Image (spheres, rainbow, N blue to C red):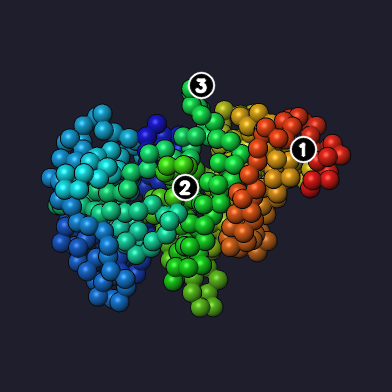
Amino acid sequence: MGWFLCSGNSNKNAKKKQNEKPEDQISSTSEKSKGNSSVDAKMESSKDGGSDHIAAHTFTFRELAAATKNFRADCLLGEGGFGRVYKGRLESTSQVVAIKQLDRNGLQGNREFLVEVLMLSLLHHPNLVNLIGYCADGDQRLLVYEYMPLGCLEDHLYDLPPDKKRLDWNTRMKIAAGAAKGLEYLHDKASPPVIYRDLKCSNILLGEGYYPKLSDFGLAKLGPVGDKTHVSTRVMGTYGYCAPEYAMTGQLTLKSDVYSFGVVLLEIITGRKAIDNSRSGGEHNLVAWARPLFKDRRKFSQMADPMLQGQYPVRGLYQALAVAAMCVQEQPTMRPLIADVVTALSYLASQKYDPETVPVQCSRTSSSTPRSRREF
């Protein structure tokens, strides 16, 4: 599968978003953007409004067509609700990039394109994907990103071919901690705070050394400020990741993202999809399957991804599952702040597990052994 939009969820996402028109994301983008001049005018108005400068470069369609050899099929990396993503090389700098082309007949439109450009031009963090530039020639809409050679997290968790390397425990914790740091930046460092609203495995991209970066900010929303507790908005996102209170009321908070992160963390630990209709009825929904197991520590080992083949630290597994359980609490007030999640996962990521020095865990009995009880 390709680099940016993973096919595992993208078709479902497209069906979910059909007939849904994104509401205004940022106050300065309330009217539709039509044509290059409209988009550029909005970008300039952002600068004039006292924001940090827009760092994204403006490309012509001709430049990006040349970079992708006229969007040749062998340059195609993936396809999703936004459109197609191609691998390209910029002639001016020889930089390898990923170019996302908006499908003019697709389900996502100019507003999400504009939000993505604004968000990633004004927000910068090592765990956010780097937007290099954009193109708004006529009715063409394209986004140019740094190329992430290892694809998305989803590519490394599900439906792996026999010759593909499985993620070990240390790598999983590294990815989880890095993704949490990106979310912490949006919640705690950005002003006003940003609610990501589309956190899922297919939106976590991996660079060299499995370094994670959050991507796809078309649904991002500015969070509540002052004494406000939430923002009200049309319910959008991906089924299986949306917090229950947001899905029911449309009231969006920072804790909505924390819930989504908890689902992602569960996927990382268990190797199960957030929604998997190929499983039996009681196991379709990952959170619904996990909740009863959270109550019995003796069953924690059953939740570890079989692909780990028992090579994980028992204490680390327990602690990671405890973090996930807190994040997916039904009541948002019971969920932790993302800063606390970062602290916990950074610690777990720092505790390197060496399977050569620790016995392999028995899949069903390890959590009931005396050694396991002492470690916890």
Q: Quadrant of residue 120?
A: bottom left
* Label 2–label 1 contact, CB within 8 A: no
Q: CA distance from mark 2 to mark 3?
A: 24 Å
- Of mark 2 and mark 3, the one earlier in the sequence is 3
Q: Is residue 293 placed above or below 123 in the rendered structure?
A: above
Local crowd size for mark 1, using a 10 Å CA cut-off: few (<14), some (14–19), many (≥20)? some
Looking at the rendered image, the quarter that the N terminus falls into is top left
Instruction: Say which of 267 and 285 sits in front.
Output: 267
Q: Considering the numbered disc 3 on the image, is that residue within a helix, a strand or a loop? A: loop
Q: In the displayed structure, would residue 14 be above or below residue 139? A: above
Work out whether residue 51 can be spotted.
yes
Residue at the spot x=40%, y=46% of the render?
17
The residue to which callout 1 is attached is 299
Q: Are marks 3 and 1 in contact (CB under 8 Å)?
A: no
Residue pictured at 65% horizontal, 41% vertical: 353
Q: Is residue 365 left or right of residue 27?
A: right
Give the label, 3 or 1, closer to the camera: 3
Residue 306 picture location, percent across and down: 64, 29
Q: Nearer the viewer, mark 2 or mark 1?
A: 2
Label 2 secondary element: strand
- Eyeballing the image, is 347 above or below 285? below
> What residue sits right under mark 2 in the picture?
212
Name the residue that disc number 3 marks. Answer: 162
Name the kind of residue labelled 2 in the image. Answer: Pro
Label 2 vs 1, first from the N-terminus: 2
- Residue 237, percent from left and from top: 46, 50
Name the foreground residue: 170 vs 301. Answer: 170
The 10 Å Cα crowd at callout 3, few under 14, some 14 to 19, many 20 or more, is few
Residue 317: image location, x then y, percent:
69, 43
